[in-house]
Amino acid sequence: MTRPQKDSTPDQAEITDDSAIPDVDGESGVDSETTTGSDHEPAETDPGSDTEEGSSTSGLGGTIRDRVESQLNEKDSTTSVFANKDLVHPDTIIDANRIVGRDEQLDRIIELLLPAVKGGRQDNILQFGPSGTGKSLIINATAEEVATLCENRGVDFGVIRINCQRISSEDKAVYAMLQDVSEKTGAEVGIKKQGTATSDKYDRLYEIVNERFEAILFILDEIDYLTGNSNDDEPDYSRLLYQLSRATAEGDIEGRSAVAALTNDTQLIQKLDGRTASSFNPDNVVFPDYDATQIRAILEHREDAFRDGVLSGDVIPLAAAFAAQDEGDARKAIDLLRKAGEMADREGSGTVEERHVRTAQGKLDVDQAQKTINGLSAQKKYTLYALTSVAVHATRSLDSIPGPVAYEVYSYVTESIDAVTKSDDSFRRYAKELASYNIISKDRSGRGRGRGVHNEYAFAIDPETVEETIERDSRITEIEQDSLQLVVESQLDEFNST
């Protein structure tokens, strides 16, 4: 197989798919059949039509306005199963009495943030643990309470909060923080997003902080996503942590400052540059998985999101069981409960039942996978597509996908679309990051004496769903599928014969 020359240049720009992802039910919200005029003449309009300017005739029951009003009237006449839907949004900042199974972590975070109230120095914090284990919930809820206490005591305490999952670089992270503090204080951002040096963005951020706050807390959620250019020796999250943790000592921030970094990566500290690790020097707070009993209690503490009597008795236990199977992710359990309620509302059933939870579970898996995949960089998409191709196109039964086979398929994929083919080491790094997103799982496997060891990959979700999502990328669709299957089979044959 002809192979393009390996290249150590930075990854290509991220591929984005601007097309809307259709609803799992296949409902796009737009009529697939509409009456239009020819390419050159306007469509004829019935002179007696009451169509108003700004509305259009759908051909399926009047104007768009008529249909909107019809659905609005229908919803107004139907009683929702929800009493306070905000309580089943995972990002809602809730009261401490609704926090379950995290007493130790809550007390520790309170202890670390309280110095802000008393005018003392705050320590930096590193919270780590799997997704949905309460990291964001605890720090956000505690920061809100501390901010209130500070206000009551006349202390100007600010919280700047960003989620790094959709931010690709240090530069963009600094601008996101600048936007956040601007919105909270009413100050002008004052500089352009593009064409402005990162150092100038830091300067403007610090300027607003110094004007408005005596103490500041930076909350950096999902910080391990902020990797930047994969060819750099130091990841961007290391640079960001260094700058923020040194800001007070260097005199950039005149008051007291601290950083709370949240991550799923238990090895994050080991990946930091030596000077960053020394400067950041955080207090570690560990968040283990929730068990099924704790997740059930979490959902029961949010049961008043629904009207009395609308939840059938098996809804909360089933939602908790699904989430417990998914590595104890409480966020997923809360999402699941909300989506089940939304389905009941769409049906107008008036009650939330087990069938709603089961249907919501399937939709949630697909929706989350699509969001994650669409946010991947180009090279991670190619890596994932190679793994998917082996899983989907192999004619033999595979318990897992051998890494060497997947890399050869990756090389074929990148060659086919004239993209840069990264090294085997880069491929393994991309695959490791995909495993951290719970799209695939990774294990090591030996092939017997003298035959070495290699990575084996398996899909945590349906690989055909993954393939369909990636194939919305126009470049990927250029790949000839019959040829791709031949490559998969030939690489599996070669791997098994060596």
Image (cartoon, helix red, strand yellow):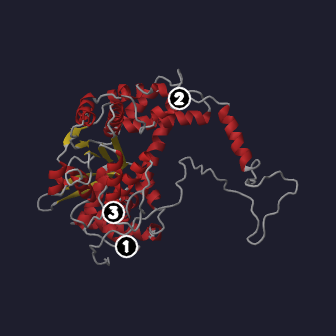
The residue that appears at 51% across and 27% down in the rendered structure is 306
Q: Which residue is mark 2?
A: 352
Cα–Cα span, label 3 and label 2: 52 Å
The residue that appears at 88% across and 53% down in the rendered structure is 48
CB atoms of marks 3 and 2 within 8 Å: no
Q: Amino acid at mark 3?
A: Asp
Q: Check disc 2 and report its element: helix, strand or loop.
A: loop
Residue 327 circle label: none
- Which one is closest to the eye, mark 3 or mark 2? 3
Q: Check disc 1 and report its element: helix, strand or loop.
A: loop
* Image position, residue 321 (x, y; %): 38, 32
Residue 200 circle label: 3
Query: In the picture shown, does residue 37 fall above or below 262?
Result: below
Determine the image quadrant of residue 66. Answer: top right
- Between disc 3 and disc 1, whose residue precedes? 3
Q: Which residue is mark 1?
A: 419
Query: In the picture shown, does residue 461 fall above or below 114?
Result: below
Q: Amino acid at mark 1?
A: Ala
* Image position, residue 46 (x, y; %): 85, 57
Q: From the viewer's side, name the closer residue of 145 and 4.
A: 145
> Looking at the figure, which quarter contains the C terminus?
bottom left
* Image position, residue 8 (x, y; %): 26, 73
Determine the image quadrant of residue 39. Answer: bottom right
> Looking at the figure, which quarter contains the N terminus?
bottom left
Q: Dot 2: within a 10 Å radius of its alpha carbon, few (fewer than 14), some, or many (20 or more) residues?
A: many
Residue 490 seen in the figure? no
- Between disc 2 and disc 1, whose residue precedes? 2
The residue that appears at 58% across and 50% down in the rendered structure is 26
- Between disc 3 and disc 2, whose residue precedes? 3
The residue that appears at 17% across and 47% down in the rendered structure is 281
Cα–Cα span, label 2 and label 1: 49 Å
Q: Check disc 3 and report its element: helix, strand or loop.
A: helix
